[in-house]
Image (spheres, rainbow, N blue to C red):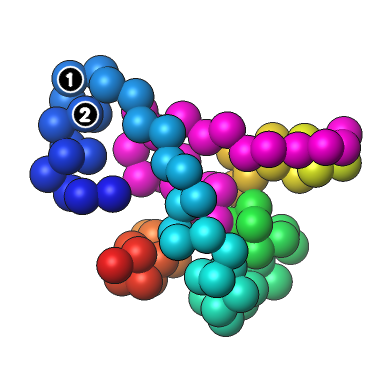
Amino acid sequence: MHRGGRRFRATNGIGYVPFFPRGGFTPLQSSTPSDTAQRLGATPLQVALAWLLHRAPNVLLIPGTSSLQHLQEYLAAAGLTLSVETLAQRGASAG
């Protein structure tokens, strides 16, 4: 997400739906979300979704799912609290 565009959209109440956030699944295979997930008792995907939700109040996530288990996992991501350090670290890896 371009920072200027993100700020403009958030300020003007324009929703943003990331498509393949974080460059697809490759960044999810890095150690950052895995390490954070382990500390939080969550999955790396939950950490990635939580990070996106913390980016701005107008980010709308539409993760695809084919099972109730995945849906429950995705919903649990909204309840994760990421530390300032984690948010900064994830932000630095966002590019």
Residue at 12% in and 44% down: 4
Q: What secondary structure is found at the residue carrying circle 2?
A: helix
Tell me the CA gap for discs 2 and 1.
Answer: 5 Å
Query: Would you call the spot at circle 1 few (<14 residues within 10 Å), some (14-19), or many (20 or more)?
Result: few
Indicate left or right for 69 with 2 as reference.
Answer: right
Residue denoted by label 1:
12
Which contiguous range is marked in magenta? 48-68
Residue at 21% in and 50% down: 2
Contact flag, marks 2 and 1 (Cβ < 8 Å) = yes
Measured from the top left, where is residue 54 in percent x and y? 41, 44
Q: Is residue 61 magenta?
A: yes
Residue at 46% in and 43% down: 19
Indicate left or right for 71 with 20 as reference.
Answer: right
Residue denoted by label 2:
9
Query: Would you call the spot at circle 2 few (<14 residues within 10 Å), some (14-19), or many (20 or more)?
Result: some
Q: Is residue 85 magenta?
A: no
Give the quadrant of residue 94: bottom left
Measured from the top left, where is residue 59 in percent x and y? 40, 33
Q: Quadrant of the C terminus?
A: bottom left
Q: Amino acid at mark 2?
A: Arg
Tell me if residue 26 comes above or below residue 58 in the rendering. Answer: below
